[in-house]
Amino acid sequence: MKSGYQKYIPFTPVPIENRQWPSKTIEKAPIWCSVDLRDGNQALIDPMNLQEKLEMFKTLIDIGIKEIEVGFPSASETEYEILRTLIDEKYIPDDVTIQVLVQAREHLIRKTFEAISGAKNVIVHFYNSTSTLQRKVVFKKDMDGIIDIAVNGAKLIKKLTDEMAGSGTNIRFEYSPESFSGTEMDNAVRICDEVMKALDANENNKVILNLPSTVEGSTPNGYADQIEYFCTHLADRKNAIISLHPHNDRGTAVAAAELGLLAGADRIEGTLFGNGERTGNVDIVTLALNMYTQAIDPKLDFHNINDIKEVFERTTKMSVGDRHPYAGKLVFTAFSGSHQDAINKGKEYMKTSNSDYWEIPYLPIDPADVGREYEPIIRINSQSGKGGAAYIMSTVFSFNLPKKMHPEFGAAVKAECDRVGTEIEPKQVFEIFEKEYLKVSGPYQLIKHKFIEESEVNDTSPKVRFDGIIKNNGFEPVEISGKGTGPIDAFFNALAKVGIEGYKFEDYSEHAISIGADAKAVSYIHLKTPDGKDCFGVGMSHNINYASIRGVLCAINRSLKK
Ligand code: KIV
Ligand code: ZN
């Protein structure tokens, strides 16, 4: 690639001064038009069959899209038949307008008008290529010749529409100077001015001027400059609806569409998840949800994004990437420890603050708004931090590990992730917890234990006595007993009698836990070892006192093993 780049012709920016769009913001949803069934469909390895197109059509309607380009009926018999089925079998709701694409050529326009008869609302969308490159290498015509093609097409469309007056079919017009973004702006304005005249554009007959970046060839600001230039130079702007049709060759179609809206556009043509020729059309899902997360009603409904994705993947046989904005499998998942911690804190904040706003770091949208609330937001791999493992223990298994235990347990989980080299499932996190705490069985084992409360009349500080039998691996069991102010104290004093000494009690917490129909107590014990190190233990029992002493013994056993 050393010198290959020299053969490319860079984008020529439009000469625009005092541009206005950079200081604007998007304030309302545009008119949406889906081109899934046309631009999206024509880019598929296996175009959708009738059933698939019908299912996609229904999904687009459910999302709330009111203008849908359903095909290119003059291009093939299949396309023609699909359109006839939509019309004859009354699949099109009254408030939805179907759009049909046609080249600005007489026989194709006539065939298109046959294909739409009987439909209620139709946009006839015609186009011809206007770019400098296409004029030079494909059409070998000057701009006047290209304008003639468009104007002749427009006149015929106007005539056929007038002939259909009173037929019950409402027809609107759309013209695309194809490859608009590769066209000199003055030529783009000139051809559209002429087309508007030929179509008799007026307040009641606004013409949609669709301005495609047929091949995306500039940074998004370059496209926005073109749109602003076009809007401000068009003779009759008020009688036009300016539509954008960005493709995604540079990966910036969403940004181009957003900046194009700032620059004065009213309407967007795009597809679900950005399917379309080559790198695709602009993604309507991302665009709409970007608006939603800026507190703007996008007027589209993606509350069930997984279902929409499923229909999309099945009917197009394309797949939505794992990191696709809002819809990808992994976009509501945090692996990094610091992200997990911040998300947890954000969730806690939302609970305690009663905030009316969505204020959770790392999550630009509430997953529940797009129907993703049941997915584990936090998943565990070797990048995950201490908070992640504790979060899984709490949300999936209801074990609320005290904060001080998080680093130790997190380290055990991380060691397992490093060992297996992959993400681990919640079930495996629990198995690590069991192995680390609940199934520690030595060196000391408690064979028998009981507590007795000993109090005398008027005794203000009653004593608890512990009696039990303890066994050290490889030794005979020994009886132990001790008294204390409470069960843990009594147990400690009993242990001292068999030489388990020097442990300092640091902290303790407990909670009830339901395991199936069974309710148990779980207690978490924090001790300092005789040489001053932290050690933790967990005990479970139906009896809270026994849960505590099991926790103490667990901590001691773990420290001795280490
Ligand atoms: O990308 C494009 O230019 C098109 C036109 C036909 C509108 O799809
Ligand atoms: Zn296109």
Image (cartoon, rainbow, N blue to C red):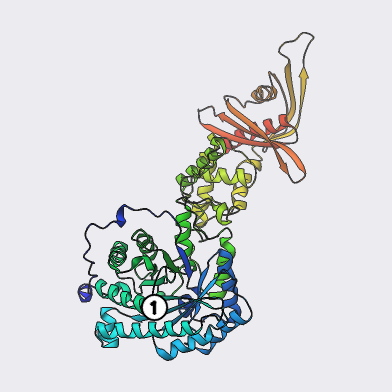
* The residue positioned farthest toward the front in the image shown: 166
**Closest to the observer, 425 or 205:** 205
**Closest to the observer, 159 or 511:** 159
Q: Position of residue 561 (x, y in %)?
A: 57, 39
Quadrant in which the C terminus appears: top right
Residue 324 shows in the view:
no
Q: Mark 1: give few (<14), some (14-19) or many (20+) Cα within 10 Å.
A: many
**Closest to the observer, 50 or 509:** 50
Residue placed under numbered mark 1 in the picture:
199
Q: Position of residue 510 (x, y in %)?
A: 65, 32
Q: Position of residue 285 (x, y in %)?
A: 49, 62
* The residue positioned farthest toward the right in the image shown: 457
Disc 1, SS: loop
Residue displayed at 50% across by 51% down: 365
Residue 530 shows in the view:
yes
Ligand 1, seen in the image, is in the quarter at: bottom left
Compared with residue 553, is residue 299 higher up or lower down, i.e. above or below? below
Quadrant in which the N terminus appears: bottom left
* The residue positioned farthest toward the bottom in the image shown: 107
Q: Is mark 1 within 8 Å of ligand 1?
A: no
Compared with residue 430, is residue 406 higher up or lower down, i.e. above or below? above
Q: Tell whether 398 sits left or right of 386.
A: right
Image quadrant of residue 495? top right
Q: Tell whether 424 sits left or right of 291.
A: right
Amino acid type, mark 1: Leu
